[in-house]
Every structure is written in structure tokens, then in C-alpha cells.
Image (cartoon, coloured by chain):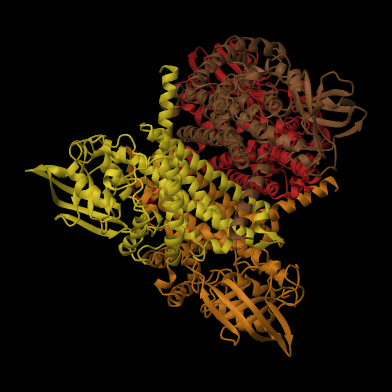
Chain colours: A yellow, B orange, C red, D brown
Amino acid sequence: MSSMIETPVKAGGEAEATDLVHRTREFIRSEVLPVDDRFDGDVTRAGGDDLRRELQEGARRRGLLAPHAPVELGGLGLSMTQRARVFEEAGYSLFGAMAINAAAPDEGNTHLLAHVATPAQREQFAAPLVRGEVRSAFAMTEPAPGAGSDPSALATRATRVSGGWRIDGGKIFITGADGAGFFIIMARTSGDAGDRGGGTMFLAPAGTSGLRIGRHVPTMDRSMVGGHCEVAFDGLVVPDEAVLGEVDEGFRYAQVRLGPARMTHVMRWLGAALRAHEVAVEYAVTRRAFGAAIADSGLAQQLIADNEIDLAAARSLLDVACAALDAGSSAAQETSIAKTFGAEAIGRVVDRAMQLCGGMGVSADLPIARIAREVRPFRIYDGPSEVHRFAIAKRAAKAARARVGS
Amino acid sequence: MSSMIETPVKAGGEAEATDLVHRTREFIRSEVLPVDDRFDGDVTRAGGDDLRRELQEGARRRGLLAPHAPVELGGLGLSMTQRARVFEEAGYSLFGAMAINAAAPDEGNTHLLAHVATPAQREQFAAPLVRGEVRSAFAMTEPAPGAGSDPSALATRATRVSGGWRIDGGKIFITGADGAGFFIIMARTSGDAGDRGGGTMFLAPAGTSGLRIGRHVPTMDRSMVGGHCEVAFDGLVVPDEAVLGEVDEGFRYAQVRLGPARMTHVMRWLGAALRAHEVAVEYAVTRRAFGAAIADSGLAQQLIADNEIDLAAARSLLDVACAALDAGSSAAQETSIAKTFGAEAIGRVVDRAMQLCGGMGVSADLPIARIAREVRPFRIYDGPSEVHRFAIAKRAAKAARARVGS
Amino acid sequence: MSSMIETPVKAGGEAEATDLVHRTREFIRSEVLPVDDRFDGDVTRAGGDDLRRELQEGARRRGLLAPHAPVELGGLGLSMTQRARVFEEAGYSLFGAMAINAAAPDEGNTHLLAHVATPAQREQFAAPLVRGEVRSAFAMTEPAPGAGSDPSALATRATRVSGGWRIDGGKIFITGADGAGFFIIMARTSGDAGDRGGGTMFLAPAGTSGLRIGRHVPTMDRSMVGGHCEVAFDGLVVPDEAVLGEVDEGFRYAQVRLGPARMTHVMRWLGAALRAHEVAVEYAVTRRAFGAAIADSGLAQQLIADNEIDLAAARSLLDVACAALDAGSSAAQETSIAKTFGAEAIGRVVDRAMQLCGGMGVSADLPIARIAREVRPFRIYDGPSEVHRFAIAKRAAKAARARVGS
Amino acid sequence: MSSMIETPVKAGGEAEATDLVHRTREFIRSEVLPVDDRFDGDVTRAGGDDLRRELQEGARRRGLLAPHAPVELGGLGLSMTQRARVFEEAGYSLFGAMAINAAAPDEGNTHLLAHVATPAQREQFAAPLVRGEVRSAFAMTEPAPGAGSDPSALATRATRVSGGWRIDGGKIFITGADGAGFFIIMARTSGDAGDRGGGTMFLAPAGTSGLRIGRHVPTMDRSMVGGHCEVAFDGLVVPDEAVLGEVDEGFRYAQVRLGPARMTHVMRWLGAALRAHEVAVEYAVTRRAFGAAIADSGLAQQLIADNEIDLAAARSLLDVACAALDAGSSAAQETSIAKTFGAEAIGRVVDRAMQLCGGMGVSADLPIARIAREVRPFRIYDGPSEVHRFAIAKRAAKAARARVGS
């Protein structure tokens, strides 16, 4: 595994990081948010990849592109802690992460490639990705009974052929697949469905024979370019050089990717939740009912205060997890906790914001309903809350067993 | 006020009522649900009023039309208690209430007309409504700072003109307005915005000069024919015969309408929540993760059990309120409690159902996401939870003051 | 099994039942509550069995004793539905159920004996119990790893000896054991710990050789005469006539007892929660903060309204379960739901009441803190919420499996 | 105002601080916890002030006394951030904060005196307090309708007399009053009840004529030496030198005291909650039900995971607030959020721990029930959650008004 960015490359001092937060904020609110609002956060209606390229050009000009990517690949090299506030600012618009080229799954794929890819793979795949020339997809989730919240159920197979591997199987919910320039594909190279090892990651450019994009799964969200697609591998052959990292080490790399990727999701959606909250409180201070501003009624105060608390708690748990990741820990418990609490808190914040605005809250006249639509799936993807709670409890039980010596 | 149906007209014995539940169930599942599923609950795509007429023709043939309407008007004359289970069966499909002509706002308008209308008004407006020949709208809510969760802010004015009244003002969120055959309009005939009296209800056929349907407010739900519209009254003149009930008694009639209308909303959405729950548990017993059916994992059991509890509690509170209404009480506390708990419980049930199904839960491949979209606004309309809690607490405080003699 | 009270013996018409509610209320508030308040609900300090006898004498004189017991045994023969309101009135004081001889475990034991005992057993054990001459205990729960939330872990053994059975084992949390006149003992007559059958119930008078009352487990509650004790059986020999019902049928009888016993617990604690709520709202209407009565501040209104909702929902679920039990159903799902929701709602209500009263709420100057202390364990005994949720979910999954045919 | 500790005096590097955490942990678990367990956390039964002196002697020998107090006064001079982990370790035992002389109200009073007292006052009052020679009390809360959650209702009066002030009025819930060496008394020197200014703080040694300790309010907790008492001032005369800081500035000083005092409460109770959680998980990994360790059942996992999440979130919000306080901010929003979330999370954690342990959880055989009894009032004192939410929402509304320019 390449270790060149084991120690996060910092963007310089804190002053530069803070300045980057402010400049990102300014860019998002002046350039990106108006487009988001004009198209109700529907990226396809707003232009899809054309819009992406246009917004990223703006970010590039302002030096805001790919804040998470290593400097060698053309990014700004921010640590997890530093990117937290920048990504939150980006997330204030549903198109913001895309605009600074920090959207899922590209951002997580960049992180993964920076850690695992060979120099040639970095050149071929990571560098154009960081520059925004292509998008990417991460093909892991499968239709039942394959890999879902339980990754060990992985059913897609890669079998040895001369000079490479032949991949067969089907995937689902592959974000950004339609229009992606390349795919990172998780396939089983040993063992059987249910085994916790035996997975390998492969790189495959779009258009390779045997790789077919199927239908867009009609999910409730609409802000992701390229949708969430079914993808089929039918005799897809890739060369040995397409193996990402080591054979049979794919599940381990998935963890390398997923811990930080969960946190960057929290960062982005936290920005979206903050917007919903701010819009709602602004609504509540200007509208009146029963003789007073809505914001001054006790039951609205409950909603507002609970939002402030949830936002602060999600942010502080996120920072704890980021600090642990920056310190080189796997941070498994910290990221599970920050993801679970964060996804649920974000959902609650947006829901309360909607409630505060009454009928307008459920309409497209305010941005809250569309934010609700986008954040709901986050309690499911990157591991449903239930699976994270299961893992959190297992670790606590393991610690207790160590204490009692059983 | 007409008192002819003060005592609910019962549809006969309990056996007939139970039979009606079963026949409604059979009709909804065989005839209505397939259309709902084919069009993801989007009534416009599914045919709008054409679909409504077609489905209602099926209900009419089976003797299932307008179970709530008085027998004299062509309905089945069910009491509130009796209609609870019938409407819940109808609500199992998002198009079900429309199919049996028991959808909002027509059902509530029928109830109101049955209690308040003159024989001529009943003939002209109520009877065709019950027969499904026309739809109707109830024009009460106004854009800020007018009547919203605080009805006393009513700003639309009706002023005396020779032989009638001239109505000026604007409304918003008027469900079913586009295509409605007639409107019940709430306007201020005395006092000023903020006064708790002085409202009057008027009847006006669609197409009357000075009544204009504006844009559809783009709300998140899609199952209501005719949308939720802005409506403008610009010099709309109606004759004296258009007054519904007595002048200045409109706020009182609104309560006559709203108590039962809240309960029938709970009935219908309870059916939708039940469907989400049943679909989810069926999913959870057939899909596996971590070596067992999802339904057999402890954290899924929590979701399933909480849904069972919420459904049972919402249904039992509904029945308590219906029994009180059937007994002739205003049932203000009972309906506020049943509405508040019901709307929130329904939301929780659908959300947990979504969570149980993982990625499929947020897709249109299952009906849960669209049910979530439809039920969310119910925590806002018919009085937001916050306003009901305010009222519930006020009544409890009043009772406590009586006990302590202060 | 005796079937003489299979059909609940009703206390006459609804008028009599309502009158009984009112008379119970009057008795509790004038005679019982003052003692409760004087001793902070600590029954030992208040006199223990002496107090019990004195209060029961008052109830006897008023014709209020043992409303649940069959008329043939000297009770009032109320159905489950009828006793709901009577027991709630009794529960308004922590000593109220004891005062009308309807406290746990006597009330449940009476129910069990009425269904299962032989005429001789009824004469010897049930009749004096109903008359308040003795108390009783139900010895089922065992220290780990024995029978607890999982009754099948039953470890106490009964082995055949000449003319009877010899019982060996230990019990814990045996309510009322200290001072009880007799014990109903659950012991394993066949199979091994973990088997779902093989339990038998035995009757044994206090003072029988080999039956020893151990320490009072120091639980947080203080309103139960006789405490929650450890009980040891060390060569306790009982005759064949001591078998209650049939050998090896004990687990089935436990269900006969537990379903209704759970509901009567809900009834009683609902009364206690209602008192906490009423005291708190009375406090909140008389005390001021920030220029207004506490009850008129929005955040207090949230607490008050949520209490009203929880009380109403717990009561309505209770009534649904009682109606099912009165109709002869095992009502397993209904009683699990009513118990789980009821116990949790009661806890929430008392906690919110405490919060409403600020510092006074956590002091003995108001009755709320002691009510909190008494109701907390109810989320654990009669089956913890977690075990009920497990059972509720299993039944829902079973129904879903039937629907999908798997 | 003395500014000598405006900048927190640090105990040296982080290594020393970490070492202090470990040594505190070792001391608490080996010396203090056994006493706590032996007396069920009842400080009076355990010896009261005698116990306090004995435990503090142990802490003194180990160099653990008064970690929060300035070095000049004999303390260890920890910043808020540094004391967070030390106090959490101390809070692991209900007697732990007392043992290191960091219990309420002494710890908060030390903080206040360090900021506001004259050199003479520091010598006379603060130094002996830090050394553990005396305890102290903070006399602010009054019986209704005086100062409670609304401090501006302050009714106790101080009137000018020759060479000093005469104080008259009554206080309640004065923690530690019985046996305190001196009192800090809040009295009104100008304005009327309801005014937000006009309070002054006075210092008065115990035993001063006109200062009378009344009854102990019988609150549910039992771990505080000196109880929560009523205190009466009846012609209490104090000299000018007894004024703490400036006349009429008392409300401002109260804020100086309360922000950090809220945080140190969170720290201590967090330790208590952690103990409840750890005891419960240890119980759950060693006890079995339904064929598996309780900790491995899904519904127990929910409880365990939610505890882990709540503990982590409370801790992270606490750290955010401490960092803000250390940076010199008033940190009003941060401390309100950390206090509100912390107090509620701590309550939830202890409650879930209790639930996990079933019957043992509500008994004194485990420490959980007594921890529950101690932490419940924390949702009320230092400002009830409702009052903090009110303040949190007001600040959010103020910010929104600034954004929208209204």
C-alpha cells in the first residue's frame, strides 16, 4: 500500500484553512446556491454533467477544487479535521460538494486511490478525477441476497484468466454510475458469500466490454449526477494492472475508504441541515401567529433549541472522529458513533425545520422539503443506523468482557 | 342549522359494517392498489379526474361509494366509529379514499354541508358531491399574514352588496381547487384580522366570475386530484343564498367540520401506514443479512415492535375520539389528542418501515417512499402538532385551575 | 380446570360500575391518600400489615373490597373492562390498591386461583385472600441463571416423594413474601432449564418446614407490604393436594395469570401517573416564572400536552386489551402492547410531572418523586419492555410470513 | 474584579494532566468507591463530614486535592478542558468529587471567589475552602415566588445600615448549608423582584447572628454533605467588607459562576453515568437469557449502543464548551447546549443501564438505582432543560433576525 499520504498533508496553517472556509462559503452562496434553488435541487434538470463542469470551473478559478485530495494529485491536502468546516460550507447547497469536486463517491474514491493505488493507477485514474475531468463509481452494493449492509455476502465473482481477471455479477445503488469515467469494482476472488475475506478491488474504465449500466433505481433523492444505478458485469475482463492494491485485501481497503467517507457525508449533510435550520428560523422570526412571531412561541422554541443542540452535537462528534482519523487511528467506534448520531440528528433537524415552516415547509417554495428528500437515505447508506448500533454495542461488550475477564 | 343528521344514521347492524370493511378491502386491493403501484401514487400521471371517475364507477357498482355521507344524500350513513375501519381499508392505497369518494376535502365538505346546508344547497351542492359528479374545495387557509394555524387571522373580506356579498382576498393550499365543481369560502364579514369571530362561509360554483385558480403550490405529496392551489377572489359576487348557515358563524362551523375531518384523515393515513408496515415486515422476513432473516435480528425487531405499538395506539385513540363524536360531544380534547398522536405515529411507522427495507425503502420499487411523501404534511395540516399541543395543554391547565379554585 | 368464571361475572349494569368508580375515588382520596402523603408512600413506616388491615376494614364497610374477585369468593366480580377505571382510582394513592385488596400479587393470585384451583383450594386459600385475612406470594422469579425474563430457565425442582412432592431451589424478587399467608410456587417437574414446558404450580402455607424467607432485596420502591424477598426451598414437602391445576401445566397457568395481571398493573400505575400529572399541572397554574404562570409557558405546555397524550393513549390501549380479555381471547399481542406502551408512558408522565415542578418535583414535599420511585420498576417486571418488543415483533413477523407464504 | 486567574493557570503540560487523570482514577476506585458501595451512596450514613475529611486527607496525600483551584490558593490550577477528564474520573464514585474537594457548591464557589474576591476575602474564605478545612454554601434560590429558574425574581433584601448591610429573606434548596463554614448570599440591593439587575453578593460566616439553617428539603438524592436546606435571614447584619465584588453586580457574577459550574456538574455526572453504563454492560455480558448473553441480544444492543452514543456526545459537547470557556468566551450558547444535552443524556444512560440489568437494576445490589436517584435532579438544577432551551432558541432567533435584517 502506498504510504505517501499516511500523514495528512496539511494546507498550511490554521489561518489558511479558515480562509478557505470563508472563500468556500462565499463561492457556494453566490454561485452555487442560486442554481440549486432555481431547479429545486434536481441536478438532472439543472444540467447534469454540464452543470458540474461549469460549477467546477468556477471553483477551480477560485482555488477551491478538491480540498481533500493530496497536493501531489492536484488537491489542497486538507486533513479530515480541516475539511470538516469546508465540506459543511459546501453542503449548504445540494450542489456544493459537486461544485468543489468533493461529492460522493468521487471524494471517497480519491481517498482510497491516494492510499492504495500504484503510481500508474494514480496517474490514470486519480489525477483526472481530482481535476474534475471524469467522475467515478464505487461498485460494491449488490441486490439481495448479495452484499448490502452485510458486505461479506459479496457474490460478484472475479476468476483468473490469462493476464487478468474475468468479472461476473450484478450491482445496485451504484451512485454516479451513469456517466462515470471509471469504476472501482468489488468482487470475490476467494471464499464464498458469507466469508469475511476474499474480496478484491478492480479498476475498470467505463465503456469496457462486459460492463453495462442498467436502470437508475428511482430513489427519492435527486442531487447526485449519474443517479444510483444497476450495473451488470457479464464477462468483464480486466488486466492484472487493474487490481487495486493486493488480491483478497478488498474488504480491508473498503474500511480504509468507508471510515473517512462516512465522516465526509456527515460534513456535507450537516451543511444541508444547517441551511434548513437557518431558513426555518428566518421564516419563524418573520411570520406571526397568535399575536407573536412564530419564533417567540414556546413550542417553536422547543424545535429551534433542539435543532441547535442536534447540530452542535453532530458537529462535535464529527470533530472527535476526524481528530482520531487524523491521528492515524482506524477510529471505528468514533466514526460509527458520529455517523449514526449525525445521520439521525441531521434527519431530525431537517424535519423540525419543515415543521417550523408549516405548509411552506413541505413545498418547493422553501428548500427544506428537498433537503429532507436528500438526507433521508443517509440513515441507510454507509451502513444503516441499526448495523452501526450493532457494531457499537459489540465493541462495548468486548471491552466489558475484557474488564470482567470473561 | 339543519339537525337532520345530528344523530348519526347507522348503516344497520355491526354485521353489515363489518361486511362493508371486507368488501372495501377487497375492492381496494384488487382494483385500486394496482393503479397506485403502477404510477407511484402520482394521481396526475395516473389520470387525474378520469381515473377518479373510473375508480368511483367501480365503487358505485359494488355499493361502496360515500360510506360517510347521509343516506338521504346517497351515502351509506356510517357513524364515525363505523367509518374508521372502512376508511383505514381505503387508505391502504393512496388512491383508495378517492375511489370510494371519501377523500379530503370532499368528505369533510359533505359532513359540513350535511350539518349546515339548506335543502336547496344540499340539492345543488351536496348531492352531486356525494354521487361523485363533482369535486369540491374548502377555501380557508391564506398566505401569511392571513389565516393559517391561527384561523382568527382571517383576512379575506366579504362585504355587503345588493342581494348578496362581494368577496375579495387570496387563499393558498386549497386542496383540490383545480377542477373543483364548487368552493366553500371562508371570509370575514365582521371584525378584523385577529378577532376570533366574524367569519362566514359561502358557497360558490367554479367558474363564477372573480374566482380564479392560481398556481399549484409544489408540495411534496402527489396523490390529491386538483393539487393544493392558490385561489384569488377579486370582486367575486355571490347571492344571499350562497351563505352557508348563518352570517358570522363560520368559525363555529369550521369546528363542526374540522373535528371529524381530522379523524377521517387519521383513518386514511393509518391505512397507508399499515401498508408501509406490512410491506416492510414482508420484506424483512424474506431478506437475509448476517446469516438470518432481517426480521429476526434484534434491531429490526425494535422497529417492527414499535410500529405495532404505534399503529395500535393511534387506532385506539382514534376510536376513543370517534366514540365521543358519535355520542354528540365536540370531543375537542379527544380529537386533538388523536390527531396529534396519530399524525406523529403514522410518520414514525412509515419512517421505520423505510429503514427496515434499506436502500429499497427509499426507492420507488417499494411503496414506502411515496407513502412517506404523502403522510409528512399531515403533521402540519389540520393544525400542526404544536398548535394542538398548545390547545391540549390549555384545556388541562383550565381543568387544573378549576380544581385548585384559581 | 375450573370453568366457573370463564365468563366474567359482571357487577351488574354500567350504572353500578360507574357508581363503584365514584365511591372508590371518594374513599381513596378521603381515607387513603392522607396516610400515603403522611408517610411519603413508605408502607412499612406507615404501619405495614396493620395499616393494610385498617384500610381494608374501611373498604369493606363501604363495599369496595376485592372488586376483581368472583362474587362466590366474596368479591365484586368486575370484568377486566370494568375494573380498569376502579383500579385506576385506587392507584391514585400508592396505598390504594392495598386498601381495596387489589394489590399485586394478591389480585393476580386471586385471578389464578379462581381459574385453576379446586374447590378445596379455593376454600383454603382463595377465600381468605379475597376477604383480606391473609396475603399471598407468587414465587416464580429466580436468581440468575434461573427463571427471569426468560421463564423457561426455571431451575427450582419438585421431585416425587410418597404422597406428594419435595421442592428445592431459590427464588428472588418475591413480592409480599414477608408476612404472606401462603405461596404459589413454580417448580420444574420435568425437563431441564431451558425447556418451555415441565413447570408445575404448588400451594404452600407460610411456616411450612423447608420454606424460608430470606432478605428483602433493597429495591427502590417502598409501597409494597412484605417487600421483594429472597425465598429458599430446602426440602419443602407438599402433599398431592397442593398441586395447583395439573402437573406440568404451570407455564400455561402462568400465562392465564400474567396477561390480566399485566393489565391490572397498568390500571393501578395509571392512577399513580394521573396523580403526578394532576399535582404538577396544579403546581404549574399557581407558580409563576418570567412573568407568567408556568403552565402558560410554551415549554411547559409541551410537557403538559405530552402527558395528556400519553395518559390517553395508555388508557385506550389498556381498554382494547381488556375488551379482548373479556371476550375470551388470550390477547397476547394486545396485552404486550398495552403493557409495554403503558409502562413506558407512565414513566414518561411521572418524569415530565417532576420536571414541571422543578426543585419541588424531586422533593418529598410533593408526591411525584415517590411515585417515580414506584413506577420505574414496572418497565422491568411483568416482562421488560425489551422482551415484550421481542414477542410483539415475532408475532408480526409470523403474520407476515403467513401473508407471503414462506 | 481580580484578574489574576483570567488566564487559566495550567497544571503544566498535557502529560501531567493525563497523569493526574490516571492517579485520580486509581484513588477513586481503590479508596472512595468501596465506601460509596458500602453505604449505597448515602453520605450521611457513611459519616458525613467525618468521611469527607478522611477521604480528602487521602487525596491530599496523593496530591489530588482541588484540581480546579488556582495554584496560589493551594489548588492544581487546571483549565476547564483539563479538569473535564479529572472530574469525570472523580464522578465515577458518588463520593469522588467530595473526596478531591471538587464537589458542588464548593467547587463553583472557589471559582467565583478566585475571580471576584478581594485578597482579604480570598485569605479568609477561599483558602480554607480549597484546603478542605471548611465547606461553603451558595444561597441564591428562594421559595416561590422568589428567585428560582428565573433569578430576576430575587426577593431577599439587603438594606444599608451603618457600616454594612442588613439582610432579610428566605432561601431554599441551599446545598451543603448544614455544616457549611460560610455562605455566599445573593440579595437585592436595588430594584424590585422582576428586575434583571440590582443583586449583590455577600459573604457571611456560619454562626452569624440572624442566619438560621432550617429543615433539610427531603430531596431524592443522598450524596451531598449538608443536604439541601432552607435558610432564613432575619436581621442578618454583615459589614461592608462582606460585599463580594461590587454592589448591584451580583447577577453578573452569578453568570461567572454558573457557566463553568454547569460544566463541572456535567463532568461529574458523566462519570457517574459511565459507571452505571459499565456496570450494566458487565452485567449483560455475564448474564444469559433465551440462550445467549444478554449483551448479545439485539434489543440489549440498542440500549448499549445508545448509551455509547449519548456518552460520547455529552463528552464532546462538554469539551467544546470548555474550550470556549478556556478561550475567554462567556460561552453562553455552548454551555447551555452542553448542560441541556448532558443532563438529559446522563439521565438516559443511567435509565438504560438500569433497564439492562432487570430486577437487579432497580435494587441496591448494583449501584445504578442510586446513581439514577442522584442524577435526576440535574435536569432541573443549574437551570431546567426548559429554561435553557428557551435561552438557546432566543439566541438562535436573535441571530436569524440579524441575518434577515429585522
Front position in the image: D57 or C196: D57
Q: Relative to A297, is A38 above or below? A: below
Q: Which residue lies furthest to the bottom in this view?
A: B162
Q: In this view, does A250 lie above or below A294?
A: above
Q: Is residue D394 left or right of residue A331?
A: right
Q: Which residue is drawn at 60% across and 36% down?
A: D328
* Residue A288: percent from left, percent from top: 67, 62
Residue A272 showing in the rendered view: yes
Most foreground residue, A236 or D112: D112
Q: Which residue is farthest left?
A: A162
How many numbered marks appear? 0
Residue in the picture at 52% in, 49% down = A348
Is the residue D257 above or below the residue A91 in the image? above
Quadrant placement of the C terminus of chain D: bottom right
Residue B132, compared with residue C277, is above or below; it is below
Q: In this view, does C384 lie to the left or right of A73?
A: right
Could you tell whether C97 is left or right of B35 in the image?
right
Residue B397 percent location from the top left of the image: 76, 50
Image coords of residue D340 (percent x, y):
61, 39
Is residue D226 in sight in this rendering? no
Q: In the rendered view of the protein, which quadrant contains the N terminus of chain D?
A: top right
Q: Which residue lies furthest to the right in this view?
A: D162
Which of the pair D239/B42 is nearer the observer? D239
Out of B209 and B57, give the one closest to the viewer.
B209
Q: Where is residue D308 in the image (x, y as percent from the top left)?
A: 48, 32
